[in-house]
Structure formats: structure tokens, C-alpha cells
Amino acid sequence: MLVDRVRQQSDEIVTKVLTQLATEVPDFLPSGDDGVESVRENIADYLAEMLDWIDLGADPGHWNLDTAHRMRHRAGQGLTLSNLLHAYRLGGAAIWDELARLADTNEVDKEALIAATPSIFAWMNTNSLRAHAVFREIDIRDARRNEQVRAALLDTVLFNESSIGAPFWDAVAALGLPRTGQFTIIAATSAELSAQQSPPDIETLISAHSAVYDSWFRLASHAQLGVVSLRPNRSDALDGIASNICADIAVTIGLSSPFTDIADCSKARAQAQVAASASSAGRPTIRYDRDVMAVLLASSPDAAASVVRATLGPVLELPIERREPILTTVYTWLQRGQSVSATADELHCHRNTINYRLRRFAELTGRPLADNFWLAQVALALEAART
């Protein structure tokens, strides 16, 4: 029987395969006698497994946990996937040559060898697939580990002052952050993210723009925080990039004021997070030094709520179908330079309707809209209510 005869020759076959691998794939053999003996055992196990496939007709999808463990161990010793696959090809060819020699000398039946050929090649193919799967698992594990290290380094830069000294500057160096340049911190929050969805890759979207020199992001389940380095004279480009991203995917973005010294990262990170808290579906991108009213309100949510109650309280007590048209009209009127005509055009209403709603707002609040100081408070309250 083919399998029994090959098993009798297994020591000789293993020695031939080991010799060929030592000659043609030097990196396959670990240094030291123990390493060589370990590889000899691995080859013997692989040969025994192949013979089991021929003898038992094993399912090509079967996964031998010992085989996977051996692959992980060899990868840990520095063996590359390409060298491992090359060793499989050489080893498979050497085993096949030995089987063919046995057939030529009539030590095994040729018909039996031909019948076993599909199982032999299926076994060889499965080992290649196993190797790819194990090395992909290792790559994913290493990437996750590297991602955790990167996140820890970014936390050091983003959440600590440079005055802590060496830990800060070591993290800057490890991340490859330039010490000076055109920087902005971005805080992005996913607006609609289920447990089954991955967070959008904000870093790739930003880095793809020609105005961006480089970026460094840390990812959480629903939020992303990163340092963006822009090319010279392009410090304002991130506003447009962020707006385009928000138009395409469901995220809100807060931007810090631009800064030029990496030591200011912690201050800028706080700005970006305040700006992010001020963003909303209606205004998905907020920049700290541009959208000052929204940022001011987000910086003090208790004070903002007090302004809303003190200014809009009587209007907010109305049913929503009566409240919303009045608030929308006053807000639009302020946005349109207090022009009744422009407000009417914007809201597709008659001028008389706009005037009625403005008068009704004044009646409910008890203050005339002609009072500029009161008008400033109204604008602040409406902004706070929208945010």
C-alpha cells in the first residue's frame, strides 16, 4: 500500500527535504541544533499529515491547530511568509520526487500514486492557504498593537503640556511630528454609527488633499481626534476639506485655531473639542476662531441654557406648530440683516406674515426688537437654542 510504504521511508524523505531546505532557503532553519531538530520534526509532521490526507481523504478545509501554532512560532522567529511558501513548494516537490522514485522502482504502485495525486496537491494548497491566514492574523494583531501604541503616543501629545518634558518630546519624535509648521487639531464625531459599522476613515479623506502635508489620528468607536499638518500658506484649506467631508458622510467636525508650534497641541485639542461640541446637523463644521458665538455658548452650556430660558421662555411655552415659525422667522430676519423683504423671500412668505411674526415675538417676550442690546441677547439665545 502506498501510504504504508512511504511511512517506512519517512525518515529518509524527511532528511532529503531538510537538506534541500537548508541549501535553498537558509533563513528557514533557526540557528542551533535544537532549531534544526525542530524543523525536522515539523517536516515529519507535515509528511504524516499529507499521508493521512491520502489515507483518510481528509477535508481540504480541515485546520490542524498544531500546524497553525507551528506557523505562528516560526513567524515569531522571523520567518517571512514568502520564505515559508517557498519552503512549502520545495518540500512538496521533494516529497513528490521521492514518491515518483518509489513508483519508478516499483516500490509503490503507480496507479495508487496517480489516484493519490489530487489529495497531495489539495494538501499542499491548503497549507499555503493556512500560511496566508496565519500571517494575515499576525499582521492584524501587529497592526492593532501598533495602533494602540500610536494612540498612546498621541494621547501624550494631545492631552499633556510640553512642560512635562521628555515624555512629550519623545512622543513627538516617535510619531514623526514636526516641531513647527502649519497645524490644526480636528475632532470628528460620527453622527449616525451603528454597532455593525466601522467609523469613517477621516484620516485618509483628509490626507488625500493636496493642501495636507501629513496627519496623525487616534480612533475611538464614535470619535476621532487628530493633528493635521498643512503645507505652507494653506492653513485655511482645512475648513473647505472638513465641509466637503461633512457633506458626504454623517459626521460633525470641530477645528481648533491654526497654530505653528507643536507644543501648543494640548491647548488646540481643547479648542477643537469645544468646537466639536458646538457642531450640529445644521452646522456640522465649527472652527474655534471663526464661529465665535457657537463656541462661546458651547464653552458654557449652563449659561447658554439660562440665556435661552430668560430670553425665549414665553415663546418656547407655545405648541411647537406655533413656536417654530416665530423662532425661524426671527432667526432668518437677523441673518438677512433685519430685512423683511429678504426674510419673506427666504421663507417663501408674504411680508405681512413676517411682520406679524416679528410683532408676536416682541409681544411674547415683552421687549421691542428695535432695542439693539436686547437684539444682541435674542441673537445669542437663538444661536444657543439651535446649538
Image (tube, rainbow, N blue to C red):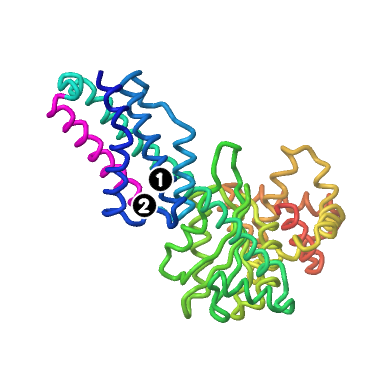
In magenta segment, residue 81: yes
**For residue 219, above or below residue 109:** below
The answer to which of 85 and 183 lies nearer the viewer is 85
Range drawn in magenta: 80-106
How many dots with numbers? Answer: 2
Residue at 57 percent of width and 71 percent of height: 174
The answer to which of 120 and 167 lies nearer the viewer is 120
Q: Is residue 249 left or right of residue 13?
A: right
Disc 1 element: helix
Residue at 21 percent of width and 35 percent of height: 98
Instruction: Name the disc covering residue 28, or none.
Output: 2
Residue at 80 percent of width and 40 percent of height: 318
**For residue 363, above or below residue 116:** below
Which one is in front in this view, the residue at disc 1 or the one at disc 2?
A: 1
Q: Position of residue 364 (x, y in %)?
A: 84, 49
Whether the residues at callouts 1 and 2 have beta carbons within 8 Å, the answer is yes
Residue at 57 percent of width and 61 percent of height: 217
Q: Position of residue 218 (x, y in %)?
A: 60, 58
Q: Is residue 159 left or right of residue 364?
A: left
Question: Which quadrant, please, contains the N terminus?
Answer: top left
